[in-house]
């Protein structure tokens, strides 16, 4: 169980991650609206259909999107693997390490230093968690971008819809949960008690 002090300390960081995640979700929806704005209202004519639309592009982009999702799952398993987490836990906890190069909501040094050392170690994992999640979210958001590319190339709004839905679904299941992540880390053999 994490202490209330640690949860309060993490609150600004959780808020920052949630904003980033929400922006990526919104961007996926935005890509669908871009395609709808460009191609949605227009009716496709017989002349357009006979013009020889590039047929295989949507299935090819679908395969690429599938591979990106699989790669994001593999990356997630590797990034959050026990040995990598234990290596990060072995580093000395320090406030400077927590905030160096990270925009994690500017946590308070006093709050950090008032935490027990085991919870300072856990708190120092949050920037690592955030970086991994942003990479995974970006990969999953790219599925919607692939759909937008397909819609532009084929001049067909409906091409982007399954890509957008897929991106939203895979982003939705990876919402930021740093507190749950830290609870799981605590259960690792050799982790901070």
Image: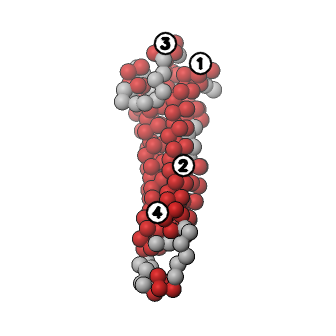
Q: Residue at x 53, y 72 (%)?
A: 42
Of the two numbered discs 2 and 4 on the same chain, state the one appearing first in sequence.
2
Q: Quadrant of residue 169?
A: bottom right
The secondary structure type at the circle numbered 2 is: helix
Q: Quick check: can you spot residue 30?
A: yes
Which tag is nearer the camera, tag 1 or tag 2?
A: 2
Residue on which disc 3 sits? 110
Which tag is nearer the camera, tag 3 or tag 4?
A: 4
Task: Indicate whether 133 appears above or below 142.
Answer: above
Which tag is nearer the camera, tag 2 or tag 3?
A: 2
Residue on which disc 2 sits? 26
10 Å crowding of disc 2: few (<14), some (14-19), many (20+): few
Residue on which disc 4 sits? 148
* Whole-number angstrom distance, CA of label 2 to CA of label 4: 14 Å
The secondary structure type at the circle numbered 1 is: helix
10 Å crowding of disc 1: few (<14), some (14-19), many (20+): some
Task: Indicate whether 54 appears above or below 180.
Answer: below
* Whole-number angstrom distance, CA of label 3 to CA of label 1: 11 Å
Task: Indicate whether 30 appears above or below 57.
Answer: above
The secondary structure type at the circle numbered 4 is: helix
The secondary structure type at the circle numbered 3 is: helix
Residue on which disc 1 sits? 5
* Whole-number angstrom distance, CA of label 3 to CA of label 4: 47 Å
């Amino acid at each position: 169980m994490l202490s209330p002090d640690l949860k309060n300390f993490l609150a600004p960081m959780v808020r920052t991650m949630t904003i980033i995640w929400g922006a990526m979700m919104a961007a996926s929806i935005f890509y669908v609206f871009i395609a709808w704005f460009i191609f949605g209202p227009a009716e496709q004519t017989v002349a357009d259909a006979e013009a020889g639309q590039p047929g295989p592009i949507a299935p090819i982009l679908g395969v690429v999107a599938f591979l990106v999702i699989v790669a994001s799952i593999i990356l997630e398993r590797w990034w959050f693997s026990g040995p990598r987490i234990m290596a990060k836990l072995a580093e000395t906890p320090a406030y400077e390490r927590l905030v160096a190069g990270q925009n994690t909501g500017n946590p308070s040094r006093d709050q950090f230093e008032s935490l027990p050392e085991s919870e300072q170690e856990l708190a120092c994992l949050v920037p690592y968690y955030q970086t991994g999640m942003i990479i995974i979210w970006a990969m999953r958001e790219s599925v919607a971008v692939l759909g937008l590319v397909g819609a532009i190339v084929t001049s067909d709004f409906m091409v982007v819809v399954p890509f957008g839905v897929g991106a939203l679904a895979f982003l939705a299941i990876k919402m930021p949960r740093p507190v749950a992540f830290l609870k799981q880390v605590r259960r690792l053999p050799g982790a901070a008690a």
